[in-house]
Image (tube, rainbow, N blue to C red):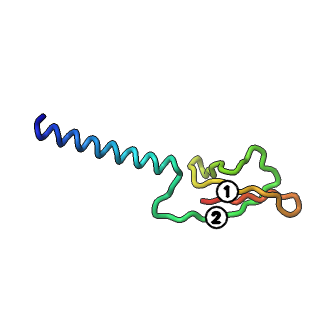
Amino acid sequence: MKRRDELVVGATIVIALAVIAAEAVWLSDTRLGSSAEAYTARFQTVGGLGVGNPVVYRGVRVGRVEAIRLGDGGWVETELTV
């Protein structure tokens, strides 16, 4: 194998590993270099909502539902991390 071919193969492997690492971070919903903010939202009904569901804003996934509990006056309180 020529030296140039070895460099091309090596560069391809490094790029492929970088893409795999980036996909793993994206799929794990990890945000590198930023801290998540916690919010509490109150709703009258939360049909179909569950812990672990994504929080979506304008079609973009920005966080997840951390907890759901019954609050005062029949309200449902949800803890969200964004």
Q: Amino acid at mark 1?
A: Glu
Residue drawn at x 34%, y 45% is 17
In this view, the residue in front, 63 or 52, is 52
The part of the image, by quadrant, that contains residue 82 is bottom right
The part of the image, by quadrant, that contains residue 65 is bottom right
Of the numbered discs in the image, which one, if any, rests on residue 34?
A: none
Residue 38 point in image, percent of width and height: 64, 64
Q: Is there CB contact under 8 Å for labels 2 and 1? A: yes
Residue at label 1? 66
In this view, the residue in front, 18 or 46, is 18
- Element assignment for label 1: strand
Residue 50 point in image, percent of width and height: 71, 48
Height in image: 82 above or below 51?
A: below
Residue 71 point in image, percent of width and height: 83, 61
Please state if 57 lies on the left or on the right of 69 as rendered.
left
Alpha carbon separation for disc pair 2 and 1: 9 Å
Please state if 20 lies on the left or on the right of 2 as rendered.
right
Residue at label 2? 38
Residue drawn at x 40%, y 48% is 21
Give the mark nearer the N terminus: 2 vs 1: 2
